[in-house]
Image: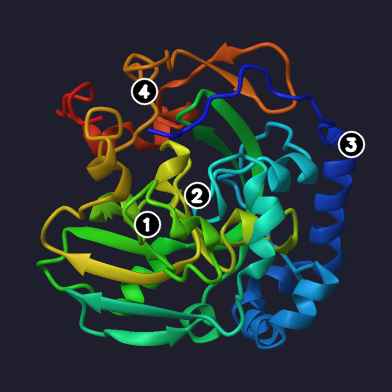
Amino acid sequence: MLIKRPEDVRPSEITEPRVYAERRDFLRNSAGTAFALAAGAAFPALLASRSAQAAAGKLSFAGGSALSTDETPNSLKDITRYNNFYEFGTDKEDPARRAHTLKTDPWTVRVDGEVEKPADYHLEDLIKTSQLEERIYRLRCVEAWSMVIPWVGIPLAGLIKRFKPTSRARFVEFTTLYDPEQMPGQRSQVLDWPYVEGLRMDEAMHPLTLLAVGLYGKVLPNQNGAPIRLVVPWKYGFKNVKSIVRIRFSNTIPRTTWALSGPGEYGFYANVNPTVDHPRWSQSRERRIGEFFKRKTLMFNGYEEQVAGLYRGMDLRRSF
């Protein structure tokens, strides 16, 4: 296995609470009620001019969410320069250095499997009727580090309802783009490409599950999974598949990349559970990027109250 655990994390500035609070207040007050009501109408215009938006670096709006944590987000520098994205290399700095080769406009996502409305969807068509939200979520990586990130995205449940899964749909599978010319890390044999991840249907439909298209009020950077990625905040980071080109509904559990590569280390569920250690290190404590001291790892990454019911009756030491 080539997942790397840094012996020490370089501290960097964390956004001051005052600065971030002022930014959120501005976003809320400048657009008012129209922020929430016009989100579905405004986002297609954003995507239609995605290249211009990306060049400008900012999204035109972002509505807040009651699902956000009240923790202070990491800085944009932290979030965009310390990444796991093996399609661009195994070092944490590789994605920021190499991901400029990824072309994200235009972008198409194939939806197929056990659904009544299979199709190849252009990104703007895929989410044009969805409400865009900003949610501040923790992201916990299996290597015992974490971040707090202000994502911008749409609830996955809303899209799933549009596709009309059949009664046979029990799982949702997500696949990353496979293109070694754009993603040079795929020229190596470190993983079996393309990258595949999946969720049980009730996990996918949970209100916390998000398809992110931006962060910190800006268009999602390439190194963070542009143009659309999964965010499931109670699971380890490897579950949050990036640069999605396919969403498939099935009756059987997906054959996911890390579960196949290291079945004794990376299970299908990937729920943050501090009582289940990785075979090569403890998961009981974590280091927040930008901080020196470690903190206690929380069950389900701190979302136990919201998601524990999904796993009632399961042995979480075996279904890891």
Q: CA distance from mark 1 to mark 4?
A: 23 Å
Please tell me which residue is depicted at 75% across the width and 62% down the height of the picture: 218
Relative to 147, say whether 284 is above or below.
above
Q: Say what secondary structure mark 4 lies in.
A: loop
Q: Say what secondary structure mark 3 lies in.
A: helix
Q: Earlier in the sequence, mark 3 or mark 4?
A: 3
Asked if the residue under mark 3 is in contact with the one under mark 1, i.e. CB atoms within 8 Å, the reply is no
Label 3 sits on what residue type? Arg
Q: Earlier in the sequence, mark 1 or mark 3?
A: 3
Asked if the residue under mark 2 is in contact with the one under mark 4, i.e. CB atoms within 8 Å, the reply is no
State the quadrant of the N terminus.
Answer: top left
Q: CA distance from mark 2 to mark 1?
A: 9 Å
Residue 20 falls left or right of residue 283: right
Check disc 4 and report the residue beneath it: 273
Q: CA distance from mark 1 to mark 3?
A: 39 Å
| CA neighbours of label 1 inside 10 A, class few (<14), some (14 to 19), many (20+) | many
Residue 139 visible from this viewpoint: yes
Q: Which label was assigned to residue 86?
A: 2
Check disc 3 and report the residue beneath it: 18
Please tell me which residue is depicted at 59% across the width and 79% down the height of the picture: 40
Check disc 1 and report the residue beneath it: 195
Label 2 sits on what residue type? Tyr
Asked if the residue under mark 1 is in contact with the one under mark 2, i.e. CB atoms within 8 Å, the reply is yes
Please tell me which residue is depicted at 47% across the width and 20% down the height of the picture: 298
Q: CA distance from mark 3 to mark 2?
A: 35 Å
Asked if the residue under mark 4 is in contact with the one under mark 3, i.e. CB atoms within 8 Å, the reply is no
